[in-house]
Amino acid sequence: QVQLVESGGGLVQAGDSLRLSCVASGRTISDYCMGWFRQAPGKEREFVGGISGAAVVTRYGDSVKGRFTISRDNAKMTIYLQMHSLKPEDTAVYYCAAAEPPWTVATMAAGYASWGQGTQVTVSS
């Protein structure tokens, strides 16, 4: 099992950038595909992006393509989500998650077994 803790959320204005971090502990994260999801009030959890264990494969949700970038530093046990050109509709709680196997990128929340507690991102217009 792996434990995940997100940080970096906050209140920003539309057009700003923000970088989220997810620090893992327990098993080495190279054993996992890592993903970011978000959930706004009253909405289902949405896939934001994912990255395979060796960072060979990345996938993004349609609403963030071209604006968000996911990366990982396995030596630091850390996953990042760089967000640019933020919009009010990006407002949500952002969650980091881990899935197996590591060589593919799962896009469904049900495919992820370990989750962090989430970090709030609020984008004002």
Image: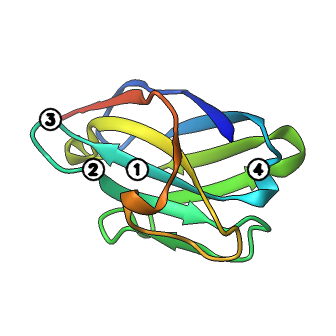
- Residue farthest to the front? 1
Q: Is residue 83 visible?
A: yes
Residue, disc 1:
37
Q: Are marks 2 and 3 in contact (CB under 8 Å)?
A: no
Q: Are marks 4 and 1 in contact (CB under 8 Å)?
A: no
On screen, residue 47 above or below 76:
below
Q: Residues within 10 Å of mark 4 (few under 14, many from 20)?
A: many
Give the quadrant of residue 6. top right
> What amino acid is at disc 4?
Ile
What's the CA distance linking mark 4 and mark 1?
17 Å
Q: Position of residue 85 (x, y in %)?
A: 39, 51
| Numbered disc 3: secondary structure | loop
Q: Earlier in the sequence, mark 4 or mark 1?
A: 4
Q: Residues within 10 Å of mark 1 (few under 14, many from 20)?
A: many
- Residue farthest to the left? 42
Residue that appears at 83% across and 47% down = 28
Residue 29's disc is 4
What's the CA distance linking mark 2 and mark 3?
10 Å
Residue that appears at 77% across and 59% down = 31
Residue, disc 2:
45
Residue 87's disc is none
Residue 41's disc is 3
Residue that appears at 70% across and 75% down = 103
> What amino acid is at disc 3?
Pro
Give the number of callouts: 4
Q: Residues within 10 Å of mark 3 (few under 14, many from 20)?
A: few
